[in-house]
Image: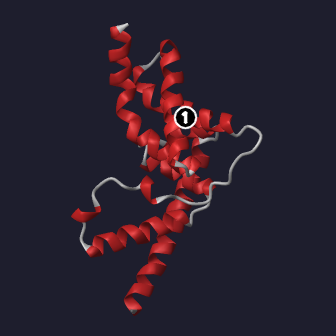
Amino acid sequence: MRTKERKFDALLGIYYQDLYRFAYWLGKDEQMAKDLVQETYLRAWRAMDKLKDDKAAKSWIFTILRREFARQFEKHKPIINSLDDSVFEVEDKHTRSPDELMDINITRQAMRNLEPKYAEPLMLQVIGGFSCDEIAEQLDISPSAVMTQLFRARKQLTLHLNKESKIGNKV
Protein backbone atom coordinates (compact mmCIF):
# COMPACT_ATOMS: atom_id res chain seq x y z
CA MET A 1 0.00 0.00 0.00
CA ARG A 2 2.81 2.42 0.86
CA THR A 3 4.39 1.80 -2.53
CA LYS A 4 1.16 2.81 -4.28
CA GLU A 5 0.92 5.96 -2.14
CA ARG A 6 4.50 6.97 -2.91
CA LYS A 7 4.03 6.34 -6.61
CA PHE A 8 0.75 8.28 -6.62
CA ASP A 9 2.29 11.26 -4.81
CA ALA A 10 5.36 11.25 -7.03
CA LEU A 11 3.41 11.04 -10.28
CA LEU A 12 0.29 13.07 -9.57
CA GLY A 13 0.65 15.05 -6.36
CA ILE A 14 2.74 17.70 -8.06
CA TYR A 15 -0.14 18.74 -10.34
CA TYR A 16 -2.56 19.95 -7.67
CA GLN A 17 -2.10 23.69 -8.34
CA ASP A 18 -2.35 23.28 -12.12
CA LEU A 19 -5.42 21.06 -11.78
CA TYR A 20 -7.05 23.54 -9.42
CA ARG A 21 -6.41 26.52 -11.73
CA PHE A 22 -7.75 24.59 -14.71
CA ALA A 23 -10.81 23.38 -12.74
CA TYR A 24 -11.47 26.92 -11.56
CA TRP A 25 -11.24 28.19 -15.11
CA LEU A 26 -13.70 25.50 -16.23
CA GLY A 27 -16.27 26.01 -13.49
CA LYS A 28 -15.74 29.60 -12.32
CA ASP A 29 -16.39 28.50 -8.75
CA GLU A 30 -13.83 27.94 -6.01
CA GLN A 31 -15.74 25.19 -4.23
CA MET A 32 -16.53 23.42 -7.48
CA ALA A 33 -12.86 23.55 -8.45
CA LYS A 34 -11.82 22.04 -5.11
CA ASP A 35 -14.46 19.33 -5.44
CA LEU A 36 -13.39 18.58 -9.02
CA VAL A 37 -9.75 18.22 -8.04
CA GLN A 38 -10.65 16.04 -5.07
CA GLU A 39 -12.86 13.79 -7.21
CA THR A 40 -10.17 13.72 -9.89
CA TYR A 41 -7.59 12.49 -7.41
CA LEU A 42 -10.03 9.94 -6.02
CA ARG A 43 -10.76 8.55 -9.49
CA ALA A 44 -7.05 8.56 -10.32
CA TRP A 45 -6.29 6.65 -7.11
CA ARG A 46 -8.87 4.02 -7.96
CA ALA A 47 -7.60 3.69 -11.52
CA MET A 48 -3.87 3.98 -10.76
CA ASP A 49 -3.27 0.43 -11.99
CA LYS A 50 -4.61 1.42 -15.43
CA LEU A 51 -1.84 4.00 -15.90
CA LYS A 52 0.62 2.02 -18.00
CA ASP A 53 3.11 4.76 -18.86
CA ASP A 54 4.31 7.00 -16.03
CA LYS A 55 5.26 9.65 -18.60
CA ALA A 56 1.57 10.01 -19.49
CA ALA A 57 0.53 10.77 -15.88
CA LYS A 58 0.02 14.49 -16.41
CA SER A 59 -2.12 14.12 -19.49
CA TRP A 60 -4.00 11.26 -17.82
CA ILE A 61 -4.90 13.28 -14.68
CA PHE A 62 -6.01 16.31 -16.73
CA THR A 63 -8.20 14.04 -18.85
CA ILE A 64 -9.78 12.65 -15.70
CA LEU A 65 -10.49 16.20 -14.51
CA ARG A 66 -12.05 17.22 -17.83
CA ARG A 67 -14.24 14.10 -17.84
CA GLU A 68 -15.28 14.65 -14.23
CA PHE A 69 -16.25 18.22 -15.09
CA ALA A 70 -18.26 16.96 -18.07
CA ARG A 71 -19.97 14.36 -15.86
CA GLN A 72 -21.30 17.11 -13.65
CA PHE A 73 -22.97 18.77 -16.60
CA GLU A 74 -24.06 15.91 -18.83
CA LYS A 75 -27.46 17.50 -19.36
CA HIS A 76 -26.41 21.13 -19.18
CA LYS A 77 -23.01 22.40 -20.22
CA PRO A 78 -22.23 25.83 -18.76
CA ILE A 79 -21.01 28.53 -21.10
CA ILE A 80 -17.35 29.23 -20.52
CA ASN A 81 -16.85 32.77 -21.60
CA SER A 82 -14.09 34.31 -19.54
CA LEU A 83 -10.92 33.67 -17.66
CA ASP A 84 -10.60 34.48 -14.00
CA ASP A 85 -7.63 36.28 -12.49
CA SER A 86 -6.88 33.34 -10.19
CA VAL A 87 -5.96 31.26 -13.23
CA PHE A 88 -2.91 33.46 -13.67
CA GLU A 89 -1.99 34.18 -10.07
CA VAL A 90 1.41 32.75 -9.42
CA GLU A 91 3.34 35.41 -7.55
CA ASP A 92 2.46 37.93 -4.88
CA LYS A 93 1.15 41.21 -6.29
CA HIS A 94 3.35 43.13 -3.84
CA THR A 95 6.50 41.99 -5.66
CA ARG A 96 5.40 43.58 -8.93
CA SER A 97 5.95 47.14 -10.12
CA PRO A 98 2.90 49.19 -11.19
CA ASP A 99 3.95 48.82 -14.84
CA GLU A 100 4.19 45.04 -14.50
CA LEU A 101 0.78 44.90 -12.83
CA MET A 102 -0.71 46.98 -15.65
CA ASP A 103 0.81 44.67 -18.27
CA ILE A 104 -0.53 41.62 -16.41
CA ASN A 105 -4.02 43.12 -16.22
CA ILE A 106 -4.00 44.00 -19.93
CA THR A 107 -2.92 40.43 -20.78
CA ARG A 108 -5.61 38.97 -18.52
CA GLN A 109 -8.25 41.10 -20.19
CA ALA A 110 -7.05 39.97 -23.60
CA MET A 111 -7.29 36.33 -22.44
CA ARG A 112 -10.83 36.93 -21.16
CA ASN A 113 -11.85 38.16 -24.60
CA LEU A 114 -10.87 34.92 -26.32
CA GLU A 115 -13.62 32.61 -27.51
CA PRO A 116 -13.78 29.41 -25.40
CA LYS A 117 -12.90 27.37 -28.50
CA TYR A 118 -9.52 29.11 -28.55
CA ALA A 119 -9.08 29.71 -24.83
CA GLU A 120 -9.27 26.05 -23.73
CA PRO A 121 -6.36 24.75 -25.83
CA LEU A 122 -4.32 27.82 -24.92
CA MET A 123 -5.00 27.28 -21.21
CA LEU A 124 -4.05 23.61 -21.50
CA GLN A 125 -0.81 24.69 -23.11
CA VAL A 126 -0.08 27.56 -20.71
CA ILE A 127 -1.28 26.04 -17.43
CA GLY A 128 -0.73 22.39 -18.17
CA GLY A 129 2.30 22.68 -20.42
CA PHE A 130 0.82 20.13 -22.81
CA SER A 131 2.02 19.57 -26.36
CA CYS A 132 -0.30 19.89 -29.36
CA ASP A 133 -0.65 16.11 -29.55
CA GLU A 134 -1.58 15.88 -25.87
CA ILE A 135 -4.11 18.70 -26.19
CA ALA A 136 -5.58 17.04 -29.28
CA GLU A 137 -6.01 13.80 -27.37
CA GLN A 138 -7.69 15.55 -24.45
CA LEU A 139 -10.04 17.62 -26.61
CA ASP A 140 -10.66 14.76 -29.04
CA ILE A 141 -9.67 16.83 -32.06
CA SER A 142 -6.81 16.55 -34.52
CA PRO A 143 -3.37 18.01 -33.73
CA SER A 144 -3.72 20.29 -36.76
CA ALA A 145 -6.99 21.65 -35.32
CA VAL A 146 -5.19 22.34 -32.04
CA MET A 147 -2.40 24.14 -33.88
CA THR A 148 -4.98 26.21 -35.76
CA GLN A 149 -6.84 27.10 -32.56
CA LEU A 150 -3.59 28.02 -30.79
CA PHE A 151 -2.52 30.12 -33.76
CA ARG A 152 -5.85 31.96 -33.81
CA ALA A 153 -5.79 32.43 -30.03
CA ARG A 154 -2.33 33.99 -30.21
CA LYS A 155 -3.37 36.13 -33.17
CA GLN A 156 -6.43 37.43 -31.27
CA LEU A 157 -4.25 38.12 -28.23
CA THR A 158 -1.71 39.97 -30.35
CA LEU A 159 -4.41 42.09 -31.98
CA HIS A 160 -5.94 42.97 -28.62
CA LEU A 161 -2.57 43.74 -27.04
CA ASN A 162 -1.50 45.88 -30.01
CA LYS A 163 -4.78 47.79 -29.76
CA GLU A 164 -4.19 48.34 -26.03
CA SER A 165 -0.63 49.44 -26.76
CA LYS A 166 -1.86 52.06 -29.25
CA ILE A 167 -4.44 53.32 -26.76
CA GLY A 168 -1.79 53.49 -24.03
CA ASN A 169 0.57 55.48 -26.30
CA LYS A 170 -2.14 58.11 -26.97
CA VAL A 171 -2.64 58.80 -23.27
Which x, y percent locates residue 37? 49, 35
Vertical placement of residue 96 versus 1, above or below: below
Amino acid on which the number 1 mark rests in the picture = Leu
The residue depicted at 52 percent of the width and 50 percent of the height is 25
The residue depicted at 54 percent of the width and 60 percent of the height is 153
Q: How is the image coloured?
A: secondary structure
Vertical placement of residue 52 versus 68, above or below: above
Badge 1 local density, few (<14 within 10 Å), some, or many (20+)? many
Instruction: Give the position of the N terminus as an image quadrant.
Output: top left
Along the line of sight, which residue is nearer the eye, 73 or 118? 73
- Classify residue 64 as left or right of residue 108: right
Residue reaching furthest to the top: 1
Along the line of sight, which residue is nearer the eye, 14 or 130? 14
Which x, y percent locates residue 52? 47, 15
The residue depicted at 45 percent of the width and 46 percent of the height is 21
- Classify residue 11 as left or right of residue 139: left
Along the line of sight, which residue is nearer the eye, 115 or 156? 115
Along the line of sight, which residue is nearer the eye, 145 or 13? 13
Residue 10 makes an appearance in the image: yes
Instruction: Give the position of the C terminus as an image quadrant.
Output: bottom left
Residue 104: quarter of image: bottom left
What is the secondary structure assignment of the residue under circle 1? helix
The residue depicted at 58 percent of the width and 37 percent of the height is 66
Residue reaching furthest to the bottom: 170
